[in-house]
Image: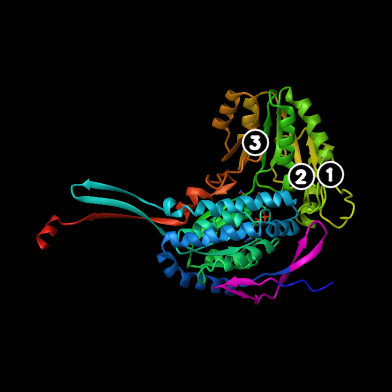
Amino acid sequence: MEKAIALPNYINNQWCTSNATEYLDVINPATAEVLARVPLSLASEVEQAVQAASEAFGNWRRTPPTERVQYLFKLKNLLEEHFEDLARTITLECGKTLAESKGEMRRAIENVEVACGIPMMMQGTNLEDIARGIDEMMIRQPLGVCAVIAPFNFPGMIPFWFLPYAIACGNTYIVKPSEKVPLTMQKVFQLLEKTGLPQGVVNLVNGAKEVVDAILDHPKIRAISFVGSTPVAKYIYSRGATNGKRVQCQGGAKNPLIVLPDADLEMTTRIAADSAFGCAGQRCLAASIAVTVGEARRSFTEAIAETAQKRAVGSGLDPGIEMGPVITAQSKARIEGLIQQGADEGATVLVDGRSPNIPSYERGYFVRPTILQNVDPSGDIARTEIFGPVLSLIHVETIEQAIALVNGGQYGNMACLFTSSGAAARKFRYEAEAGNIGINIGVAAPMAFFPFSGWKESFFGDLHGQSNHAVEFFTQTKVVVERWPSNWSRQF
Ligand code: NAD
């Protein structure tokens, strides 16, 4: 086999070979084939990127917002032009189906489109005559150098929850992609290069912990966005905040989906299956617990078990495939271990997706859809984020018990309800303790013009990604109070 290419970093508008001594293989999870090698870059390379971004900041913040967004218009067109290639790259390195990758890129582009409205979104406020002859205004100014640390599961979309807003607001930026899926950002940065953005405005540093720690500790980095697992989110939030930075961290999840007896069974089953098994369950908004209420138990259990068994599993590039592999061999082993743990805690493995045979992809990291029935709500498996295609079934008798179950969980990323009752929907929307709520929607992913609102252990910070929250996160407010003596007319 040819030696896999070593990926470069992009610093100060130059593609540069890393000085790293360690590289990791980037692997296609459907075939276990090595696609490339990613450097575990050094703290000194973060230093170079910060230096470049910091030097670029002065001129970039003085570039009028109307001019800054012209680069985003160009980027939007380039992303559309290269849409198929970007989606294919996501599928190759991350495993999801091509349709899922296209959906992901569409969401990425929507964030660029929204950030093109910065000349409106970044405006401040003012009031004349706060006292006689005195006016007051609040203006928004960029912070300086900002950075994002991204997870593996949406290599194309997640950096776009932040980057377009950050640079449109006049900041300069550093992206640290997940070391498991660095290829998509290589392609995105090739397109960013084509927009003609000035030197140092956007930078890409590949790597893992050394790069992250250098970002957390660098005095010139003003704000950090993180998306990933909760333990790492807590670490980044506390270390970044101790160093005086603005930090927003989106963490893990364990999302419940509630089925009331009056829900439309066919629609609920179809949507629940997509929520639990879409992207092989590796979505932070995936439903991982289905709570049946009253008479919904029997009909939903039968229907979801049948749907899970029928799901077409294979390489995401092949037509007709509904679910791809999970990300790594370690992840497959972990998920299969957690299925066993569920069984050991007393659940029935109603549909068992462990060790499947996927013809032509015997080396891939596949787990088929799995359903655990009668999961103990107080057991470990009901609380652990599995991050694989495993749906746990829990049964309760009333909507109050279902809401208590939702609210008793440590996470608060998403909760959804399936019903035909408006009153039940309102009660749920009002009482459920989660930042994203779905009513007859299985993956309640906010559009780019709404904030991505995780709660509890799914989010650390106050301002979320996307929309006006991103504009607030990437700007600092300045209040000006002014008085102009009224004797000016004597000069003329
Ligand atoms: P992860 O926490 O392992 O890694 C995320 C990033 O942190 C990577 O860039 C990685 O290099 C870095 N990192 C990992 N360990 C580190 C350490 N000890 N010190 C410093 N940096 C470290 O997450 P993942 O496995 O890539 O992604 C899956 C997780 O992300 C799941 O928990 C999922 O729920 C979560 N997620 C959350 C959201 C959300 O919006 N809340 C969205 C997507 C994914």
Tell me, what colour scheme is on the image?
rainbow
Q: Could you tell me which secondary element the residue under label 1 belongs to?
A: loop
Disc 3: CA contacts within 10 A as few (<14), some (14-19) or many (>=20): some
Residue 149 picture quarter: bottom right
Which stretch is magenta? 7-36
Q: Are marks 3 and 1 in contact (CB under 8 Å)?
A: no
Q: Position of residue 192 (x, y in %)?
A: 58, 65
Q: Is the residue marked 2 within 8 Å of ligand 1, measured from its CB?
A: no
Disc 1: CA contacts within 10 A as few (<14), some (14-19) or many (>=20): many
Q: Position of residue 408 (x, y in %)?
A: 62, 36
Q: Which residue is mark 3?
A: 441
Badge nearest the viewer, 2 or 3:
3
In the image shown, does 312 or 370 lie closer to the viewer?
312
Q: Are marks 1 and 2 in contact (CB under 8 Å)?
A: yes
In the image shown, does 456 or 221 lie closer to the viewer?
221
Q: Which residue is mark 2?
A: 389
Amino acid type at image mark 3: Ile
Q: Quadrant of ligand 1?
A: bottom right
Q: Which residue is mark 1?
A: 353
Tell me which residue sits at (74%, 52%) in the image.
98
Residue 452 visible in image = yes
Residue 463 visible in image = no
Number of dots carrying numbers: 3
